Image (spheres, rainbow, N blue to C red):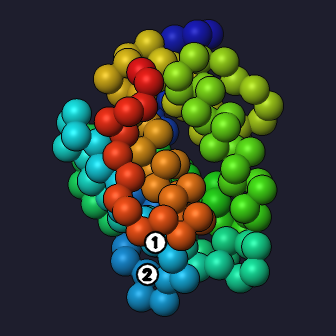
Amino acid sequence: MFDDINDLYQQVILDHCKKPRNFHEMAQATCSAQGHNPLCGDQLKLFLSLEGDKISDVSFVGSGCCISKASASLLTEFAKGKTRADVETMFERVHEMVTTGKVLGDVGKLAVFAGVHKYPARVKCAILSWHALMAALKGDQKPVTTENEQA
């Protein structure tokens, strides 16, 4: 059973890596943020369209490893239609999950990253887009980096 779940998780990650969702520049973005993982060279730019407190649209562009691209893709699917509070709560859950392996609450499809904590170098790949999302919501124009992220 455990191997079946791992296989499924790997398939989901590979699918989002090869065919990332919402992979395009957004011309009418309300805010955006850039992220960089110096460890493996992942780079992305995240675009948000906000209507009040709600994310009406989200997209990204960039290059990086499969984990990084899949994480950004799944993040965009999650974030559409969510409020800032929803996103902040999920950031905390995803951060805890990828750094410790503990799944606190419902993380939906993002559970595919639960095993990332076993590979410390990949933690930064999985969390990069989430740091960019938080920076975009705060209006922080300085590029975010995973350099200080604890693996």
Q: Residue 32 carries which label?
A: 1
Determine the residue positioned at 63% across, 43% down: 91
> Residue 131 appears at what percent x and percent y?
49, 49
Quick check: 106 left or right of 65?
right
The answer to whether the residues at label 2 and label 1 have Cβ atoms under 8 Å apart is: yes
User: Is 57 situated above or below 83?
Assistant: below
Q: Can residue 6 be spotted in the picture?
A: no
Q: How far apart are marks 2 and 1 (CA)?
A: 9 Å
User: Is 113 situated above or below 20?
Assistant: above
User: Is 85 situated above or below 128?
Assistant: below
Between residues 3 and 93, which one lies in front from this camera angle?
93
Q: Name the residue under label 2.
A: 26
Which label's residue is closer to the chain start, 2 or 1?
A: 2
- Indicate the amino acid at tag 2: Met
Q: Can residue 137 be spotted in the picture?
A: yes
- Which quarter of the rendered picture does the C terminus lie within? top left
- Which quarter of the rendered picture does the N terminus lie within? top right
* Crowd rating for badge 2 (residues with CA inside 10 Å; few <14, some 14–19, many 20+): some
Determine the residue positioned at 58% across, 64% down: 138
Quick check: 43 left or right of 144?
left
Determine the residue positioned at 77% across, 35% down: 106
Between residues 52 and 23, which one lies in front from this camera angle?
52
Location of residue 89 by image quarter: top right
Determine the residue positioned at 36% across, 39% down: 146
* Crowd rating for badge 1 (residues with CA inside 10 Å; few <14, some 14–19, many 20+): many
Location of residue 95 by image quarter: top right
Say what secondary structure mark 2 lies in.
Answer: loop
> Residue 130 appears at what percent x and percent y?
52, 48
Q: Which-is-in-front pick, marks 2 and 1?
A: 1
